[in-house]
Amino acid sequence: MKTFHSRLTCVLEALVCLCFLFFLTMVILLVGLRYLFGSSIPGANEIITILFVYTTAIGAAIAVGQRGHIAINILSENLPERLAKRLAKFQLILVAFINFAIAWFSVPWISQTGGNLMPTLGATRAVVQFSIPLGCGLAVFYCITTAIVGLEEAKNGDSTRTSSSSHTRDQDSSA
């Protein structure tokens, strides 16, 4: 599971990087076309906006998987290691539950409002709105795999630094 978790993270990070490279290329191209030739590519601004939304959703899921989300660690830093790890798992459960709820309730919203068309591309708004259940679903998946990876390491007695967490509170101090 740890290998799958790491590989999925690498693939999604590469996808996000490609999207940023595409943003850079398109923005430079659009600025050049606009100021040098007085022209533009129809729909390019909407495509950039759509990709930005997807990039944000995927990036947020990656951050959850790497435990890079916003956290106040006063309590967990002052707990014994065993309790701190249990608290970390409980936090993952809460984050997974919140993301599952957002994904669940976004589906009826998308079915009601997703049929409206975007002005330039003519695509339905559901194309953009689908980023919500996608990002939240990935976040739930990352919470589950992060918890499993942590459980596997606890069972195996693996005291090496995990690739799924960069926080010292989640790692065994015997390393």
Image (spheres, rainbow, N blue to C red):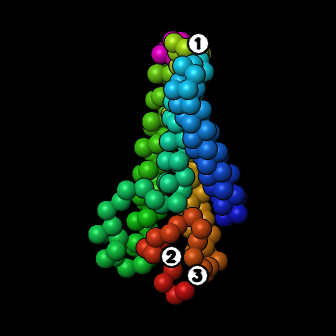
Which of discs 3 and 1 lies nearer the camera? The answer is 1
Mark 1 and mark 2 in contact? Answer it, CB < 8 Å: no
- Sequence order check: which comes first, mark 2 or mark 3? 3
Give, as a three-letter code, the residue at label 1: Gly
Mark 3: few, some, or many residues within 10 Å (few <14, many ≥20)? few
Q: Name the residue under label 1.
A: 122
Mark pair 3, 1: CA separation: 53 Å
Q: Residue 159 carries which label?
A: 3
Q: Characterize the magenta stretch by its predominant secondary structure.
A: loop
Assign a secondary structure to mark 1: loop
Residue visible at 48% across and 84% down in the picture: 173
Give, as a three-letter code, the residue at label 3: Ser
- In the picture shown, does residue 160 fall above or below 57? below
- Sequence order check: which comes first, mark 1 or mark 2? 1
Q: What stretch is highlighted in magenta?
A: 112-117
Residue 139: give x, y in percent of width and height: 53, 47
Residue visible at 51% across and 12% down in the picture: 119
Residue 142: give x, y in percent of width and height: 57, 53
Q: Quick one: which residue is furthest to the left in this view?
A: 74
Residue visible at 33% across and 67% down in the picture: 73
- Assess whether residue 39 is covered by the magenta stretch: no
Mark 2 and mark 3 in contact? Answer it, CB < 8 Å: yes
In front: 143, or 21? 21
Q: Mark 2 points at which residue?
A: 171
Assign a secondary structure to mark 3: loop
Mark pair 1, 2: CA separation: 49 Å
Dividing the image into 4 quarters, which one contains the C terminus? bottom right
Assign a secondary structure to mark 2: loop
Q: Quick one: which residue is furthest to the bottom in this view?
A: 174
Give, as a three-letter code, the residue at label 2: Gln
